[in-house]
Image (spheres, rainbow, N blue to C red):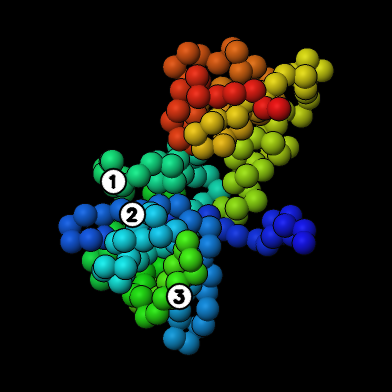
Amino acid sequence: MELKTFQKISYGLYLVSSKRESKLNGQIANIVFQITSEPPTIGLSINKQNLTHEFIQESHIFAISILSENTPLEFIGHFGFKSGREIDKFKGINYKLGGTGVPIVLDNSVGYLEAEVINQIDVGTYTIFIGKVGDAQIVADAEPMTYAYYHEVKKGTAPKTAPTYIKEEVKKMDKYVCTVCGYVYDPQAGDLDSGIKPGTPFEKLPDDWVCPVCGAGKDAFKKEE
Ligand code: FE
């Protein structure tokens, strides 16, 4: 079996949110798909260890914000690599409450779907929630982010963020991997979200530079083998 085949499946990048009583939480997910159009239903696969999973199981409501290509890595890291058990992820975030009371994140959103769970399937480490969509709105006229775009462009290995002219010594510079979240710092691409120009070697990054995805310090990075 060629496991790489799975990487040929296309996905988007979404922010899934839910609530438990007055507590709000959200996380990043890529497994989101429309199932039927009449009535409109949506499928969502969530890891059982996540707090958002607990919230959806208890409240039976969730919202899906479709993230735009312009979403900063820091925003994805805030929702994707931090736990709502430690921080209030909604502090400082622009959101509104939907008709069901579920929080709907509007920052970096192209549009959203609000749903109530009508069924769920236990698939071991994950649960697939099937929701009936009660509301759906376009938020911004922007391109939705695909999972491939997130990995190739946002992580700086694609030509879109790379300079058109790359010096030979730049090509030889080492990439560094974040041991916390797996983000790869590529000197050819720099870290534009943090103001780091393409062509900046890892060693020349300021001491207070942090992983744009999870916020870990430089000492959490190791040279890519
Ligand atoms: Fe990281």
Task: Measuring from the top left, give residue 107's x and y in whole percent.
Answer: 39, 49
Residue 70 visible from this viewpoint: yes
Mark 1 sits on what residue?
85
Crowding at label 2, few (<14), some or many (≥20) Cα neighbours within 10 Å? Answer: many
Q: Secondary structure at mark 2?
A: helix
Disc 1 to disc 3, how far (Cα)?
25 Å
Say whether disc 2 or disc 1 marks the residue closer to the N-terminus. 2
Residue 51's tag is 2
In the rendered structure, which amino acid carries the disc numbered 2? Leu
Snapshot quadrant of residue 75? top left
Task: Measuring from the top left, give residue 138's x and y in whole percent.
Answer: 44, 64
Q: Residue at x 43, y 30 (%)?
A: 215
Tell me the quadrant of the picture where the N terminus can be found: bottom right
Mark 3 sits on what residue?
121
Say whether disc 1 or disc 3 marks the residue closer to the N-terminus. 1
Q: Residue at x 55, y 30 (%)?
A: 178
Crowding at label 1, few (<14), some or many (≥20) Cα neighbours within 10 Å? Answer: few
Task: Measuring from the top left, give residue 36's x and y in whole percent.
Answer: 51, 82
- 92 to the left or right of 166: left
